[in-house]
Image (cartoon, rainbow, N blue to C red):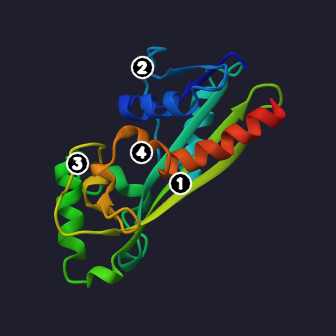
Amino acid sequence: MNRIILATHNEHKTEEVKHILQDLAVDVYSLKDIEWTEEIVEDGETFSDNASLKAVAVAEKYSAEYILADDSGLAVDVLNGEPGVKSARYAGNDRSSQALCSKLIEETKDFPFSERTAHFVTILAFYQPHDRTIMTFEGSVDGLIIDKMVGSNGFGYDPVFYLPELGKTMAELSSEQKNKLSHRYNALSNFKKYIQQNV
């Protein structure tokens, strides 16, 4: 395996994946790198559904390639798991970190801080061309939702996702710190173990 197509246009995500997988002898190409312009419809009911949908969509055109797709999001317990698969669209058409965090703060403000438990979740779907199968790998990290945005690193909900054991939000961590504990890191670590042992 010399390269993997990562089924995303998100530059933050691409850099994070490249960094975490840097000790594997594999080149990571994003959809932007391969000039993919088609929209991939993510209408699954779970993170696993959406990750697999993305992997399959790319595999229909690049069936001879290894493909890695993910779906990630935030699940807040007092909101019955929302925003969940709708994490990127939680604030409507405005997908900025400011809009997403503001909406989440508003939705959780009436709950005590101790009850605002939340989980960042990543599901990876890995398409293997030799048998055209898809395997999934999961990673998560637990935290609490705070009532204001803190920190300037990261993106999405990172500024309101508080890590009690560190006393910081995800957005206050350096990229190196985040890459060692994030939900995507945990999922990619499981993926790396599989690659090292099987591919």
* Residue 32 marker: 2
Q: Earlier in the sequence, mark 3 or mark 1?
A: 1
Question: In front here: 36 or 177?
Answer: 177
Q: Residue at x 48, y 23 (%)?
A: 30
Query: What residue is pinned by disc 1?
Result: 47
Q: Residue 132's image quarter? A: top right
Q: Residue at x 41, y 76 (%)?
A: 77
Q: Nearer the viewer, mark 2 or mark 4?
A: 4
Q: Residue 61's image quarter? A: top right
- Work out whether 57 lies above or below 138: above
Mark 1 vs mark 4, CA separation in Å: 25 Å
Mark 3 vs mark 1, CA separation in Å: 20 Å
Q: Nearer the viewer, mark 3 or mark 1?
A: 3
Query: What residue is pinned by disc 3?
Result: 97
Q: Quadrant of the N terminus?
A: top right
The answer to whether one can see residue 128 in this image is yes
The answer to whether the residues at label 4 and label 3 have Cβ atoms under 8 Å apart is no
The answer to whether the residues at label 2 and label 1 have Cβ atoms under 8 Å apart is no
Give the amino acid type for the residue marked by disc 1 in the picture.
Phe
